Image (spheres, rainbow, N blue to C red):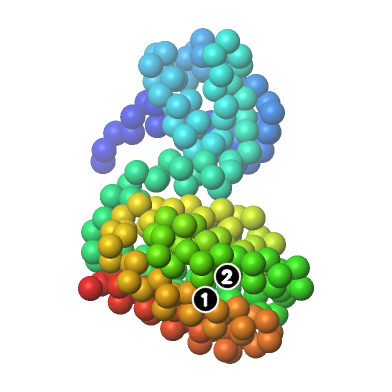
């Protein structure tokens, strides 16, 4: 059996104390010297353990201040795997799998959005849709309004974690796209956005699902060609 690194053992035990709320948000961790004594390890192991906890968003490390327990945030977790994710999405098979994941997510979301969207949501979507129409020849502006359109649909569910997750995932995907592949399809993408909007406006979940599937199938075909 592979022996566990000392820093991993320290990090695992501190993480356990945080997760079980033995150490609560805002609590100061013992000093490095105290941790060295408690775990019978050297300073490098303690510092490496604290860095791992910081990367998970479990502690805040500031120069000249005590290390304190923090509440993990979705943004922190996703940021720490950003480089790996972008690397994976640069590969055709993984990008195709991601587009399928996106389809599963957004089809479920748009059904719920058709049920819960408000008049204010529709007004916002309509304004974004008009800007999307006007940007069909401009890749960057079209992408901005495209993402805004999809994010606004997701935000109708009032789930900040879901919104942050989608925003991060789509930003990873955009970094791996070739703009020349997409510009010829902008007008078609806009028309598909308009169909999604009309279904949401009518509050018809089945039509919204069909429109979203059609749109994302178009995107998947672009990705795989």
Q: Is residue 10 visible?
A: no
The residue tagged 1 is 193
Between label 2 and label 1, give the one nearer the viewer. Answer: 2
Q: Quadrant of the C terminus?
A: bottom left
Of the pair 12 and 108, the residue shown nearer to us: 108
Above-or-below relation of 32 to 157: above
In the image, farthest residue toward the right: 119
Q: Residue at x 48, y 80 (%)?
A: 192
For residue 224, what is the image quadrant?
bottom left
Q: Residue at x 37, y 26 (%)?
A: 6
- Residue 221 position within the rendered picture, expressed as x and y whole percent measured from the top left: 30, 77
Q: Quadrant of the N terminus?
A: top left
- Helix or strand or loop: what does disc 1 sit on? helix
Q: Which mark is residue 129?
A: 2
Q: Residues within 10 Å of mark 1 (few under 14, many from 20)?
A: many
- Helix or strand or loop: what does disc 2 sit on? helix
Q: Which mark is residue 35?
A: none
Q: Residues within 10 Å of mark 2 (few under 14, many from 20)?
A: many
Q: Is label 2 in contact with label 1 (beta carbons under 8 Å)? A: yes
Per the model, the C-alpha gap separating discs 2 and 1 is 7 Å
Above-or-below relation of 131 to 119: above
Residue 66 shown left or right of residue 87 in the figure: right
Q: How many marks?
A: 2
Choose the circle earlier in sequence order: 2 or 1: 2
Of the pair 21 and 84, the residue shown nearer to us: 84
Q: Residue at x 39, y 53 (%)?
A: 172
Residue 121 shown left or right of residue 161 in the figure: right
- Residue 51 position within the rendered picture, expressed as x and y whole percent measured from the top left: 45, 27
For residue 61, what is the image quadrant?
top right
Residue 194 shown left or right of residue 112 in the figure: left
């Amino acid at each position: 059996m592979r022996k566990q690194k000392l820093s991993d053992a320290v990090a695992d035990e501190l993480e356990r104390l945080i997760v079980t709320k033995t150490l609560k948000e805002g609590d100061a961790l013992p000093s490095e010297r105290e941790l060295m004594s408690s775990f019978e390890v050297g300073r490098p192991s303690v510092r490496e353990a604290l860095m791992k906890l910081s990367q998970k968003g479990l502690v805040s490390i500031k120069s000249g201040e005590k290390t304190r327990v923090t509440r993990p945030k979705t943004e922190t977790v996703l940021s720490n795997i950003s480089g790996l994710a972008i690397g994976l999405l640069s590969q055709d098979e993984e990008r195709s799998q991601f587009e399928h994941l996106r389809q599963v997510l957004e089809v479920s979301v748009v059904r719920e959005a058709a049920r819960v969207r408000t008049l204010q949501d529709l007004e916002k979507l309509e304004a974004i849709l008009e800007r999307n129409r006007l940007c069909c020849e401009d890749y960057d502006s079209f992408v901005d309004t495209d993402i805004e359109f999809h994010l606004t649909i997701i935000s109708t569910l009032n789930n900040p974690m879901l919104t942050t997750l989608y925003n991060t995932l789509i930003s990873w995907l955009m970094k791996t796209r070739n703009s020349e592949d997409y510009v010829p399809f902008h007008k078609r993408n806009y028309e598909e956005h308009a169909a999604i909007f009309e279904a949401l406006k009518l509050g018809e979940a089945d039509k919204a699902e069909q429109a979203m599937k059609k749109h994302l199938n178009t995107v998947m075909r672009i990705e795989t060609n």
